[in-house]
Amino acid sequence: MMMKRFGPVQAALFLAALSALPLGAFPASAQTAAEESDDVERGIAEWQAGDYRAAVMTWLPAAARGNAHALFNLGLAHRQGRGVPQDMGKAEDFFRRAAAKGHAPARTYVGIFLAKRGETAEAIDLWQQSAREGDPYARYMLGVRYFNGKDLKKDVPRAYGYMLVASNAGLTQAGKALRRMDELVSPEERQAG
């Protein structure tokens, strides 16, 4: 499927319009789920190649149809300011839309936004849901909170366990945190974790 590429002004206007519409505002298309998934994957390849703008343009139609992965990716683009101007409000909106469709990593990012506003109980609830679904970043966030005793009762073995699982999933910052924890945590606490 050939897609017309928008200019920067057109893309910004389309993104603004998309973020203002409620979920389900676009009619269903004849595109199959497999084709939509291919579009999301193509956008990921463009992103990894450093063509952020092309990736954003590739994800827009799928996001407009409510594809959770495309919505999440647009949230990341807005959060990082890659392919679009950095806009934390739009980032949170895209993450919320993806989270509403059951996207665990998006739910984790919504929790981060909530925590930054001091809404930590809600953030922790979201991270716990995402951690149960296997999201390594949610496990990392909980590991940090349990280790520091911030907003959760300090529980070093649990913190170590969360961090270990997140590190084993390939999360770089969890690996760094785990190495630091290894210096501070007793062998008994590591074993219990």
Image (cartoon, grey):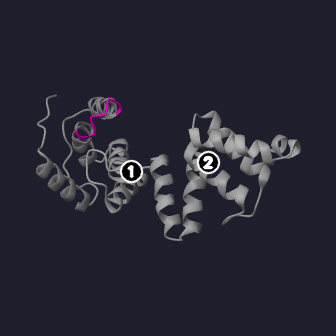
Q: Which residue is mark 1?
A: 98
Q: Which label sits in the foreground, 2 or 1?
A: 2
Q: Is residue 102 left or right of residue 13?
A: right
Q: Is residue 32 visible?
A: yes
Q: CA distance from mark 2 to mark 1?
A: 20 Å
Q: Is residue 134 visible?
A: no
- The residue closer to the viewer here, 130 or 90, is 90
Q: In the picture shown, does residue 124 fall above or below 171? A: below
> Does the magenta portion include 51?
yes
Residue 31 in which image quadrant: top left
Q: In the picture shown, does residue 70 fall above or below 24? A: above
Question: Please, what secondary structure does the residue beneath circle 1 have?
Answer: helix
The mark found on residue 118 in the picture is none
Question: Please, what secondary structure does the residue beneath circle 2 have?
Answer: helix
Residue 19 in which image quadrant: bottom left
> Does the magenta portion include 25?
no
Q: Furthest-right residue in view? A: 188
Residue at 64 percent across and 41 percent down: it is 176
Write the start and end of the magenta stretch as one range.
Answer: 48-53
Please provide percent x and percent y for residue 1: 16, 28
Residue at 81 percent across and 42 percent down: it is 190
The mark found on residue 140 in the picture is 2
Do tag 2 and tag 1 residues touch (Cβ < 8 Å)? no
Q: Is residue 26 left or right of residue 7?
A: right
Residue 49 in which image quadrant: top left
